[in-house]
Amino acid sequence: MNCHKVSRRDVLTGAAGIALAGAARGQMQPAPASPVSIARCRAYDETFDKALASTLDKIGGIGSLVKGKTVAVKLNLTGNITRYPNRPELPYRNEPATVLSLARQIARAGATRIRLIESFFPAKQDLELWARYGLDINAINNIGCKVEWENTQNMGQAKQYKRMKVPWGGYVFPAFDLNHSFADCDVYVSLSKLKHHWLAGVTMTLKNNFGNTPCSLYGGDCGPDGNEDPKGERGPVCHSGTTTPPKGVPQELNRESPREPGYRIPRIVTDLTGVRSVDLAIVDGVESIRGGEGAWNPGVSIIRPGVILAGRNAVCTDAVCMAVMGYDPRAERGTKPFLRGNNTLRLAEAVGIGTTDLTRIEVAGLPIKDAFCDYGPGATG
């Protein structure tokens, strides 16, 4: 790291720097607050359907949100399944029953079309690739409204990418070229897990957006012209910044900024949340893992909080999730669980996406103290 950049890095890492970031982007009012609900649920059976319905009802229901609309549901099927096969005994990916339950409830609420989206390898549109994750393709396709499946790892079923700008100008990128699905929807839903992340500290609603970048343009083998059949993951472009996106794709604002994943990932996640805000966040904490985000992390173990959380604001939802896990949603880097990276929630709050102040967030249903499940020190490994 060049020494003349250290002061900038240190300022942007700390609480004062985050406040300055918000002021620099014209944020004069407190970030918005939005209710979050919690429901008790200990199994992926018919009780999950009831608990999810109750959770959604307590934030005002979803009828007015989805009726007559195209609803994109971003799944969390994390990890290259060609390298890390599906392991139901380590519940770090979406449980299939949660996807079916959510799709049914969106259809019942009157959605015209549901588009299930996620980025995975190989970058193809074959339905059998989704079935690798245990998803019941036939049942989902017969929920009562039109269902589409889009692997957003490349251009997919469109003829071009959609350029989506970061409203405040961006921390790392001013805009992204993304699969059309993120723009061609009326409602954007995130379905994630309640768990740690090795670099980002936690991964719920906000971090679920990191996978929105197509590896065809943001993968390690994207090349100067893009690669519609990518094999390389996002590390060189997004984590370490050693590789640039292809020509014609929006480039970084400052190539002299830190080339360090703990700095870059939270900021890129915030930028991605800005280009397509989350309209409905659902976090599955029935069963999950702690100690990391997947089977590749050393020392991960199963944890069973037995809860479902839902909200209409990504930051507020994740703030309540952190409290349920036993953490301060305003924690600084270097304190649990942000052992290796900056606090994405604070960065998102600074640009006005949502508040981390629990005193401003109404919690409906199960109180935080009753939902509490000690996740420990974080991804210590």
Image (cartoon, helix red, strand yellow):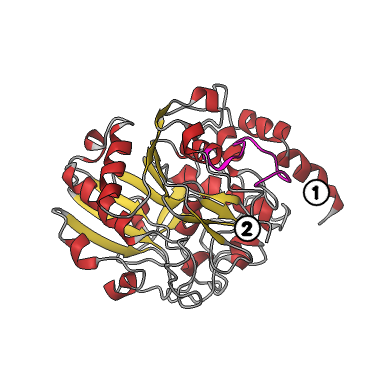
Q: Is residue 9 above or below residue 123?
A: above
1 and 2 marks in contact (CB < 8 Å):
no
Q: Is residue 86 visible?
A: yes
SS for callout 1: helix
334 magenta-colored = yes
Residue 78 magenta-highlighted: no
Residue that badge 1 annotates: 5
Q: Position of residue 75 (x, y in %)?
A: 38, 57
The quadrant of the rendering that contains the C terminus is bottom right
> Is 291 situated left or right of 58 in this image?
right
Residue 38: x percent and y percent? 40, 37
Of 377 and 6, nearer the camera is 377
Q: Residue at x 48, y 71 (%)?
A: 80
Q: Amino acid at mark 2?
A: Trp
Location of the N terminus by quadrant is bottom right
Along the line of sight, which residue is nearer the eye, 319 or 156? 319
Residue range in magenta is 324-337
Q: Position of residue 320 (x, y in %)?
A: 50, 36
User: Residue at 45% across / 70% down in the picture?
Assistant: 87
**Of helix, strand and loop, which mostly describes the magenta segment?**
loop
Q: Residues within 10 Å of mark 2 (few under 14, many from 20)?
A: many
Visible in this render: residue 172?
A: no
Residue 211 appears at what percent x and percent y? Answer: 48, 59
**Residue that appears at 39% across and 63% down:** 152
Residue of label 2:
198
Q: Is residue 65 left or right of residue 36?
A: left
Residue at the location (30% across, 58% down)?
Answer: 97
Mark 2, secondary structure of its residue: loop
Figure check: 136 above or below 108? below
